[in-house]
Image (cartoon, rainbow, N blue to C red):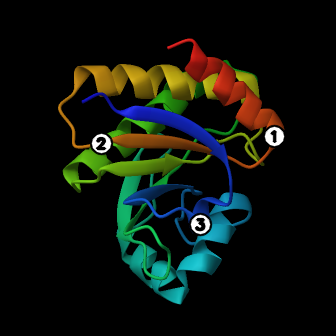
Amino acid sequence: MPTRLTACQADITTLPVDAIVNAANTTLLGGGGVDGAIHRAAGPELLSACRPLGGCATGDAKLTPGFRLPARHVIHTVGPIWHGGGQNEAALLAACYRRCLEIATDAGCTSLAFPCISTGVYRFPPEAAAAIAVQHVSEWLAHHNHPLQEVIFCCFSAEDLARYHALLAKI
């Protein structure tokens, strides 16, 4: 059965999925935007679980429980900061999506929700980031054995949602 790829406009902390992805910083100790919202919703236990992980490199990801979230797990990934596109940003962003899919598979997740990684304070152009997300997630799903039945691109804005709907309509 093929994995269902969808997009929604919602608060990612409210989604009842096996795992949500946190667009984290390298410390994994909380921050602003999606990261701050996930830490607030999960409760102080999330910070306690992140402390011993020793941070996370850009393009990599690490798993914690979801604690007070409806999601069982949080997959923390560190997207690249946009510096104009000449510092391997696209490849690093693609690596975030692939690594999250690998971790979700290893954890036996059947549903996974991604935010728009790196498009907030890290300034990755939203159009390019969405294209990378949809392309690399769909390609990874097509070429790997995995338990995922649904992958959701959870958008904060109506503009992002329209962008993902247009991209998903093409695959």
Tell me the amino acid under the disc marked 3: Thr
**Cα–Cα gap, marks 2 and 3:** 19 Å
Residue 40: horizontal and vertical position, in percent? 64, 79
Sequence-wise, the earlier of marks 3 and 1 is: 3
Q: Quadrant of the N terminus?
A: top left
Sequence-wise, the earlier of marks 2 and 3 is: 3
Q: Quick one: label 2, few (<14), some, or many (20+) residues within 10 Å?
A: many
Task: Mark yes or no: residue 83 visible.
Answer: no
Tell me the amino acid under the disc marked 1: Ala
**Cα–Cα gap, marks 2 and 1:** 26 Å
Residue shown at 82% from the left, 34% from the top? 159
Residue that lies at the very extreme toward the front in this rendered image: 1
Q: Which mark is residue 13?
A: 3
Pick the residue in front: 20 or 79: 20
Residue that numbered label 1 is attached to: 158
Residue 18, by quadrant, is: bottom left
Q: Which mark is residue 148?
A: 2
Tell me the amino acid under the disc marked 2: Leu
**Cα–Cα gap, marks 3 and 1:** 18 Å
